Amino acid sequence: MILSTKNQFQQCLSTSENGEFVAQFKDLSLSSVFQPIYNKFNDVVGVEALVRIFNNRSKTSIRPDQFFHSSLTPLDDKINVERLSRVIHIRNFAISSFANTSLFLNILPAAGESFALSDVETCLLSSRLKELQIDRSQLVMELLEIEENNTFQFKTAIQKLSDAGYQIAIDDFGVSASTEQRVKLLQPNIIKIDRSLLVKYVSGDTSPLLNGVKIANDINAKVVVEGIETEEQFHAMKSLNIDMYQGYYLAMPSPITPTLKCTG
């Protein structure tokens, strides 16, 4: 079963001791951390929400990339965990000090396709944003580097989100399905360059990253370079006048400290 109603989501939600929203799905506990994204003037212009997954039965943490990429995880479970993650991320963002910036949300293509079949103007996501006084333009839908199931439905869904005022980003450009072809198909607002292209760039293989920047410039999209972990990498990207920067060198992902009371 795919979670789809407000009541189904509410049954999975609770708050932690420090006031953060968390979720439970089957044997899994889900929580949020946020990693700041900086502009060229070193201002925080957004945060990427990342889910932390803990298996209550085995008492172990599960890496999100392994969970979402595993062929052993049922697709319905992937979609439900992704949807619940989105729910808690948005609520935690709304009560955080970042609430006036942009929120970057990871979206499974298979989950994103569902928007093609819904009224984006009245869906649960749009309704909740209105309740929390978050403008749709603050949400950046980061499409993960996983193949979509139905290309036509995928494109239709993303176009509907874009037309409704949401920003669209291609995540991990240069890896797997995050290709030039997907960029041309979806015409995103933002391209996030994968860390592997950054590593190649500072090692002397500059073409892949520069090609990604050119593709972004050709469609008037902004560029985020992900995975900056050293001063050398940071200065190399600054010299290219990249729009936005993200990585451990700049800030680690961390839980929010609520500045507002949870509203349920």
Image: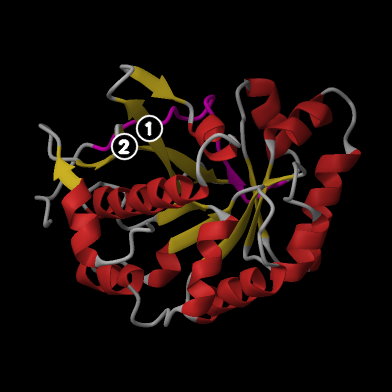
Does dot 2 land on a helix, a strand or a loop? Answer: strand
Using the numbered discs, state the Cα–Cα distance from disc 1 to disc 2 in whole angstroms: 6 Å
> Quick check: 204 left or right of 182?
right
Q: Residues within 10 Å of mark 1 (few under 14, many from 20)?
A: some
Query: Residue visible at 27% across and 38% down?
Result: 256
Q: Say what secondary structure mark 1 lies in.
A: strand
On whether residue 132 falls in the magenta region, the answer is no
The reply to whether discs 1 and 2 touch (Cβ–Cβ < 8 Å) is: yes
**On the rendered structure, is 28 left or right of 215?**
left
Relative to 108, 241 lies left or right: right
For badge 1, the amino acid type reads Arg
Q: Which mark is residue 37?
A: none
- Residue 252 in percent (x, y) is at 44, 27
* Position in image of residue 263 (x %, y %): 11, 57
x, y (%) of residue 55?
34, 25
User: Which quarter of the figure is the C terminus placed in?
Assistant: bottom left
Quadrant assignment, res 172:
top right
* Residue closer to the observer: 167 or 250: 167
Q: Is residue 227 above or below residue 217?
A: above
For the N terminus, the quadrant is bottom left
Q: Earlier in the sequence, mark 1 or mark 2?
A: 2
Left or right of 65 on screen, residue 10: left
Q: Which residue is mark 2?
A: 30
Range shown magenta: 241-256
Which residue is depicted at the point 38% across and 58% down?
2
Task: Label the magenta part by its dominant secondary structure.
Answer: loop
Front position in the image: 30 or 90: 30
Residue 252 counted in the magenta span: yes
Residue that numbered label 1 is attached to: 52
